[in-house]
Amino acid sequence: MDKRIIFAVAGAGKTTYIIESINEEDRTLIITYTVNNLKNISDSIKRKFGYFPRNIEIYTYFKFLYSFCFAPFLSYKLDAKGLFFEAPPRNTFKLKRTNLRYYQTADGRLYKNRLAKLLEVKNVLPEINKRLEKYYDCLYIDEVQDFGGHDFNFLESLLQASIKVLLVGDFYQHTFDTSRDAKTNEGLHNDYDSYLSRFEKIGLEIDTTTLRNSFRCSSQICDFITSNLGIQIRSNRKDQTYIYEISDSEKAKELFNNNSIIKLYYQKSDKHPGFTRNWGDCKGENCYNDVCVLLNKKSYSLYQEGRLKDSAPLTRNKLYVAFSRTRNNLYILPEPLINY
Amino acid sequence: MKRFVKGVRLSNYCRFKDLSLDFNDRLNILIGDNESGKSSIISAIDIVLSGSRNKVDALGLDKLFNAETVETYLKSKKRYDELPILFIEVFLNDINRKELEGKSHPSGQYCHGVYLLCQPRDDLSKEIKDILDKGDNNFPFEYYSVNFKTFADQSYTGYSRFLRHLVIDNSKISNDYATKAYINTVYQAFVDGAERNNHLNKYRSYKEKYTISELANINARVEDYAFAVKSNFKNNLETDLTITENGIDIENKGMGRQCFIRTEFALQKNGKELDVILLEEPENHLSHTNMHRLIQKIKDTDSRQVFLSTHSNLISARLDLRKSFLLNSSSYDYLQLDKLDEDTAKFFMKASDNNILEFIMSKKVILVEGDAEYILMNQLYLNLTSEGIERSGIHIISVGGTSFKRYLSVAKLLKIKTAVIRDNDGNYEENVSQSYKDYVSEIINVFSDKDDKVRTFEIGIFNENKNICNELFAAKRRTLSVLEYMLSEKAECAFQLLEKKGDALLAPQYIKEALIWIRE
């Protein structure tokens, strides 16, 4: 059975690679992490085929987990009332893993980061794999680096199913930890090589070359990322783009009022007017030419000292996502420079 | 891929506290007397396949809920968490649809299916508790939720159409709504999606053209306003559509013909999408001839699954008895004849005029050989026990000839207490002892005179009632003796005996034994 994981860099065409691999015959399941990316993939499929083929289905991970894996087996038995999206309350941490309260709120909803563990405890993993084999010929997972906690263990089990598997991900684009639950797989993303070896152990072919170079980012942007964040990324492009560091408030204002340039904030971008997003939220998006990254006070001083790579890993990864959205020119703007 | 209903499980639904039925992928016959629940089973399948909340509301949850369950609950401590639930599970064959396959249903096995679940609403539990605490015998039906879900825990509605079904209820033929629903279901089964859109579109544009061209004259004469033909969703092709035969609207045909057309039309082979056809008492309004034609049509249908409820002897026996479910109003279980051997099933199918249905609906039966026994048995029983035989719950069936064993196969299977009363035909050992030794059991017994000389019923009667027989029949005899006459005119003599001397008639010993045995 052909099972492969491709490690890619930002803008190398992960999604495009998936789209190119799918056809109108094989019963295909595509799982991704975010609703944004789901829409992105769905649009690309319609573009490729001119319509949406019936043999292809796309799920966000939690939708797949709940409706394909959990509901058919346990929903009636546990009288489940859907997912609980917030983190489980602290008092549940001490509960035994066999206690249903560890997994389910009093009104019947299931803590989403523990759902995968529940499937394991209820011994339905083999049945889920059988179901997967019955209804699909191939499984594609985009943004696989976002699996963590119990979900990563579940992924390992899922990958044993006898169907074709292709995973794509970018280790450094791991920007959120929705799956985290106490110590389960706590250190998973600490080290690239040991992360890689987890997949090797399950028997996946590891591919770090196919999507090694970015099509989106120019070599200037790639070098900027490598030198500032310590993340290796190279470009397939020969043309030149520019990086501007803005320090004058007139320039900042002009830039700020230009709604064709996306402004990427560390967080709470919706509090700011105009065309804005958060650093990490634009993962999987591929539609920006010029990009303006706003650095908050802390990041800005690290940047000035050339020490951005020492940011907290998740922050560093979010910045990586933000910088790597740039197709053309990149503007670096200290957040305090903007006042309105 | 053939799509069909593999089975149902009914819990607290109508007459059934918990009933499971496994169905055949072609024909299933539900046989039963009135109130036996055969229509409820057809409705259960219909409700769940339709996914229609309206159907549940129209019937009323209070009517659908098992009355005994409700009563038992009201007599209990009436705890909220002990409120009964009602469900109907419909098991489907594996059609490779993941949205149908799962364990998330009351019975919990991993398979394809859909179900209806009615349970008290937890969000209203406080209000429900208040009602229950009040102490009057008020069951909170209105506080129950009605949910249609697949075994994979997906909610669904009638639009999902996992499977196409049609109910034809000939007892509701004069109902306008039912007729409309029938015509539309059949229409939709015959067209494919795009074709239907085209029909609807063309019909609307014809109407508009009519308004423009034909109503132009009159509209020229009115100011500010205009006449127009309606063309909205209440006045579209599907509301105006009907079915005709030789140019005559089926609604203008006789009841019998209407019933026939409906069923025949639905069974047509070029109807692409109907998977399951449910026929409610198709014998309604049908003549004998039409009934035979209908039976043939049903027999010829092999692509679809057919459910048929009936109390017609003719229908059930002509179709394969082994596909029958027998429902009895005095029992909550059902009996199935699919264990019947092929030979016996065929016999009942071929037999011209048989009493199979009466037989299987009875609990105690006396099988006799001919008309003479049939005529006198009632009276002999009355004389012996001073009780009417019907009141004792015993049926007498004349099987004509010696096809007793066919009936005994059924009796064995359905545990019907059966006494065979037959002639020894001059050889008790061979014709009785040996012949039935595989059948005789606690519930089956064969009675005949052990004296080979008393070879027929008439001889036995004559021996026991010599005076009466001589008195009645001797006067006109010239060439034949009284006994010879009785043997030559069996039914006529039996009738005379019953009419003129019924009260005084004594039963031969073996018949006495039979009557006492069956009565026990």
Image (cartoon, coloured by chain):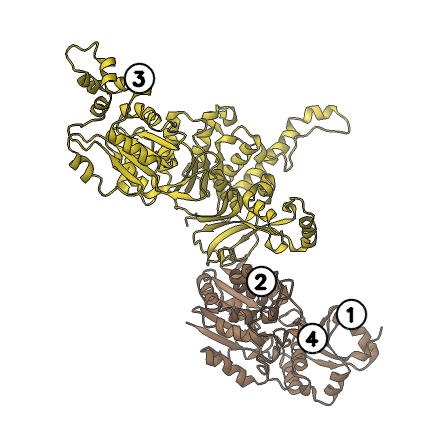
In the rendered structure, which amino acid carries the disc numbered 3?
Lys
Q: CA distance from mark 2 to mark 4?
A: 23 Å
- Density class for disc 3 (Cα within 10 Å; few <14, some 14-19, many ≥20) is few
Task: Name above or below for residue B389 compared with residue A153.
Answer: above
In the image, are marks 1 and 2 on the same chain? Answer: yes
Q: Is residue A104 left or right of residue B134?
A: left
Who's the residue at 51% across and 71% down the image? A120
Q: Helix, strand or loop at disc 4? A: loop
User: Does label 1 or label 2 sit earlier along the sequence?
Assistant: 2
In the image, are marks 2 and 4 on the same chain? Answer: yes
Name the residue carrying label 3. Answer: B501
Q: CA distance from mark 2 to mark 3?
A: 93 Å
Labels 1, 2: front one: 1
Name the residue carrying label 2. Answer: A42
Q: Helix, strand or loop at disc 3? A: helix
Labels 4, 3: front one: 3
Image coordinates for residue B209, horizontal then vertical, percent: 62, 32
In the image, are marks 4 and 3 on the same chain? Answer: no
Colour in which chain A is drawn: brown
Name the residue carrying label 4. Answer: A279
Who's the residue at 83% across and 79% down the image? A249
Name the residue carrying label 1. Answer: A271
In the rendered structure, which amino acid carries the disc numbered 4?
Trp
Colour in which chain B is drawn: yellow
Of residue A41 and residue A107, the one placed in the foreground of this image is A107
Image coordinates for residue A32, horizontal then vertical, percent: 57, 68
